[in-house]
Image: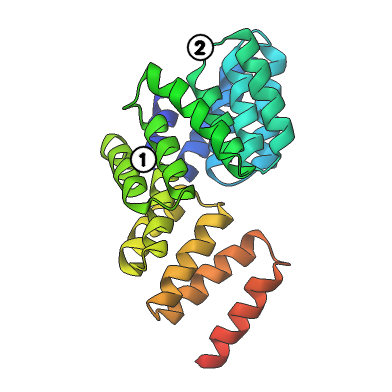
């Protein structure tokens, strides 16, 4: 069943993956792998709290499995808990210095901290391992985007999606690049796909809403704002924007 869950996640079928993961857990409640797939499925639904709870169960059952600790750190990174994510990734590298995913996570932390020299240093390290690997391409694109080189960023993000059309980071990076280049139609296309794959990603939804506003697709923008408020009901900017959009109709 793990292969079915993996396929569902790759195809952006988050709800199907979650249902399969729950069914697998019922059959193997003592297996760390079952909790691992449940964690990934919850994460794809945007439920970081449940994802962390599940990956903690996986780690408790198999503390020697370094990948689980690394996945937990990436989840914390996605939840903007940078210090905890950084600490976890450093611990992962202490156990396995060749863990490419940990270096990628540290690159994104450096970018979040606006530490471009550190991000570039780490990128040079991972490019020695595999410069064409999709996560490396996304990291390179993210650094280029932070530097204002949107053409290089788009080239990297596009190459990453050529290898994996469902790479959320590549799609969202592509979308925000197109927004920065004032090409909202292309931005909306990429961000809409990213929002379908990452149902609970508020940042992607905000960018999608901006592309729809730029296109004057006000009805669609209101629907997107409502999706943000379903995830964060007390989000004041979204409440104000929805009120403004409704006042126009």
Q: Quadrant of residue 163?
A: top left
Q: Which residue is mark 1?
A: 11
Report the front residue among 146 and 24: 146
Left or right relative to 84: residue 209: left
Q: Residues within 10 Å of mark 2 (few under 14, many from 20)?
A: few
Q: Position of residue 9 (x, y in %)?
A: 43, 36
Q: Position of residue 49 (x, y in %)?
A: 70, 40
Report if residue 67 is visible in the image: yes
Quarter of the image where the N terminus is located: top left
Residue 132 badge: none
The answer to whether residue 208 is above or below residue 155 is below
Left or right relative to 7: residue 203: right
Tell me the mark number nearer the camera, choosing from 2 and 1. 2
Report the front residue among 30 and 8: 8
Q: Quadrant of residue 41?
A: top right
- Marks 2 and 1 sit apart, C-alpha to C-alpha, by 28 Å
x 44%, y 30%: residue: 5
Report the front residue among 106 and 55: 106
Q: Position of residue 206 (x, y in %)?
A: 54, 63
x 51%, y 27%: residue: 121
x 51%, y 60%: residue: 205
Which element carries disc 1, helix, strand or loop? loop
The answer to whether residue 167 is above or below residue 206 is above
Furthest residue in direction left, as rendered:
162
Total labels drawn: 2
Q: Which residue is mark 2?
A: 98
């Amino acid at each position: 069943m793990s292969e079915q869950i993996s396929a569902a996640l790759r195809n952006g079928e988050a709800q199907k993956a979650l249902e399969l993961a729950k069914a697998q857990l019922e059959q193997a409640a003592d297996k760390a792998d079952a909790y691992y797939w449940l964690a990934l499925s919850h994460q794809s639904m945007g439920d970081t709290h449940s994802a962390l709870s599940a990956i903690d169960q996986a780690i408790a059952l198999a503390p020697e499995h370094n990948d689980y600790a690394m996945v937990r750190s990436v989840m914390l990174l996605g939840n903007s808990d940078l210090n905890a994510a950084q600490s976890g990734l450093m611990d992962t590298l202490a156990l396995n210095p060749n863990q490419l995913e940990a270096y990628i996570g540290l690159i994104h932390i450096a970018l979040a901290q606006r530490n471009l020299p550190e991000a570039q240093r780490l990128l040079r390290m991972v490019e020695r391992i595999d410069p064409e690997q999709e996560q490396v391409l996304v990291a390179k694109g993210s650094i280029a985007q932070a530097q204002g080189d949107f053409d290089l960023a788009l080239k990297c993000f596009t190459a990453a999606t050529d290898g994996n059309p469902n790479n959320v980071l590549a799609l969202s990076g592509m979308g925000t690049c197109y927004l920065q280049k004032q090409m909202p139609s292309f931005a909306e296309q990429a961000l809409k796909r990213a929002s379908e794959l990452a149902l609970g990603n508020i940042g992607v939804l905000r960018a999608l809403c901006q592309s729809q506003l730029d296109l004057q697709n006000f009805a669609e923008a209101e629907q997107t704002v409502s999706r943000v408020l379903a995830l964060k009901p007390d989000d004041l900017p979204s409440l104000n924007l929805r009120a403004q959009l409704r006042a126009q109709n």
